[in-house]
Image (cartoon, rainbow, N blue to C red):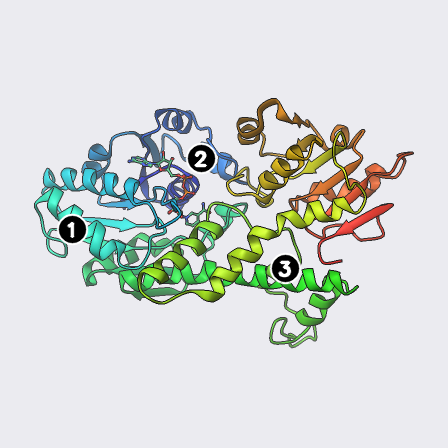
Amino acid sequence: MRVSIIGAGYVGLVSAVGLAEVGHDVLCVDRDKSKIDLINEGKSPIYEEGLAELLAANIGKRLRAITSIAEAVNQTDLTIIAVDTPFDGERIVLRSIEDVAREIGRALAEKDSYHTVVVKSTVVPGTTDSFVLPILEEASGKLAGEDFGLGMNPEFLREGQAIADFLNPDRIVLGGIDRRSHDVMSDLYEPFAGVELLRTTTRTAEMVKYTANSLLATLISFSNEIANLAARVGVDAMEVMRGVHLDKRFTPIDGDGSRVWPGAISYLEPGCGFGGSCFPKDVKSLIAFGEEHDSPMRILQSVMDVNEAQPAKMLDLLGRHFPDLDGVAVTVLGMAFKPGTDDIRESPSLEVTEQLLARGAVVTVYDPVAHHGVVKVFGDRVTHGEDLESTLEGAQAILLMTRWSDFERIPELLKTRPQQPVVVDGRRLLAKDSVAIYQGIGL
Ligand code: NAD
């Protein structure tokens, strides 16, 4: 199928590369010319494991990048909208969706054949039906369901494993305004034979995405709230959670007696809070959407409250050893909001680094891949470490913020140091007796 994707960000670019890889002819569109140029050179503007290789393998063959939406609509049969939908404190901002829908509509006016438009951006229930559809009809002078199809197909990829998730999805949710839109979207996903496919309304598809992210965020904040209490009463939350995980409703026992460890277990562990471009934004958007519809989301409000207070726990733990941080050399390890990505949006590390600087600490930061964005945020207010070894030198305290597996080397690297730093483990990655002075969330 000939497919165009508008927005070459984390979702758009990964989808474009993934769909080209499974055999579609893909046009990737972004208004940011520098991104388009990079993509056409076979280079990825973002870091995701495996992305650069797949991009290089497909570019110029089944994948091309351009800046014109009109050209993209004209040369393809289906257009996916994957632009940003940020939250402005009151509601999600549909500005990019609106601009893109209008341009697609204008292009549809010039096209004789049937075309299908699919919203992939995360949008609150009703957006596709009540916002995108009227813009498309008005700008094209055509009728949805007759002259063009419309659907909503939420994306569930996880940053850090985006390519693997896109190529091996656990489910595909297709919301459509009519049967033909559903059928076209099903054709798009034909190469993913065997994957469970849910055909539903656009509103339901929109709601599935928010519900899934809100549930995972709830598991995290629940675990963190338990962790904070455990720490107060002299109990290790890791052991508590281990005792909970061993319930066979969470970790079923296989026929051969071995445990199955579902991915959800990783959301039921103590930590310094969730970040990223999705969980905080999506939970806040759903809270605001609930308010708007007279259905207050009390649990989700608490999920956000717990999460917003969690990064400060790292400084509380540090404060046990350094009541005054003025002039103390602190290394912050991990700036990406999770391992496997260079995305630092809403990363708890940003908040923690700001708080350290405000208290006069001398801060060094290090992340194996998230370097560019960090320099932009902090400039020369911090020292930017080049590798793990050199970053640990001279540190009086180390705050471990991201679960990069490379950080498992810390105990080994610190072993021979005459002066042992305090290690504050925000992800409970290290064994608590593996370094001389250890503090951890939930301990
Ligand atoms: P992003 O900010 O990384 O990328 C958005 C891209 O859209 C940018 O490159 C921007 O230049 C482009 N764009 C914006 N307006 C445009 C216009 N008028 N014309 C052409 N290009 C335009 O965003 P993202 O992280 O890829 O997220 C996109 C959507 O997918 C959001 O709704 C997000 O909530 C959702 N989502 C994100 C993830 C994730 O892990 N990042 C996962 C699932 C769903």
- Say what secondary structure mark 3 lies in: helix
Q: CA distance from mark 2 to mark 3?
A: 38 Å
Image coordinates of residue 189 in percent, x first then y, are: 34, 54
Q: Quick one: 129 or 316, which is closer to the camera?
A: 316
Task: Describe residue 180's horizontal placement relative to residue 442 as left or right.
Answer: left
Q: Residue at x 16, y 42 (%)?
A: 105
Query: What's the amino acid at mark 1?
Result: Pro
* Picture coordinates of residue 164, whole percent (x, y): 51, 49
Q: Give residue 387's position: percent from left, percent from top.
A: 70, 29
Which comes sooner in the sequence, label 2 or label 3?
A: 2
Q: Around disc 3, counting alpha carbons within 10 Å, would you say few (fewer than 14), some (14 to 19), or many (20 or more)?
A: many
Residue named by callout 2? 55
Question: How far across and how far down the image is residue 146, in percent?
Answer: 10, 55
Residue kind at label 3, given as amino acid type: Asn
Residue at left 61%, top 36%? Answer: 354
- Is 375 located above or below residue 176 in the figure? above
Of 146 and 336, which appears nearest the observer?
336
Q: Could you tell me how far apart the alpha carbons at marks 1 and 2 are, in whole angstroms?
A: 35 Å
Q: Secondary structure at mark 2?
A: helix
Q: Amino acid at mark 2?
A: Leu
Residue at mark 1: 134
**Left or right of 173, for residue 329:** right
Give the number of the mark in front: 1 or 3: 3
Residue farthest along the top direction in this orientation: 380
Question: What residue appears at the point 65 percent right and 60 percent down from the top-left corner?
Answer: 269
Q: Which residue is mark 3?
A: 224
* Residue 236, quarter of the rendered image: bottom right
Tell me the SS state at disc 1.
Answer: helix
Q: Is residue 225 above or below residue 349?
A: below
Q: Is residue 301 left or right of residue 352?
A: left
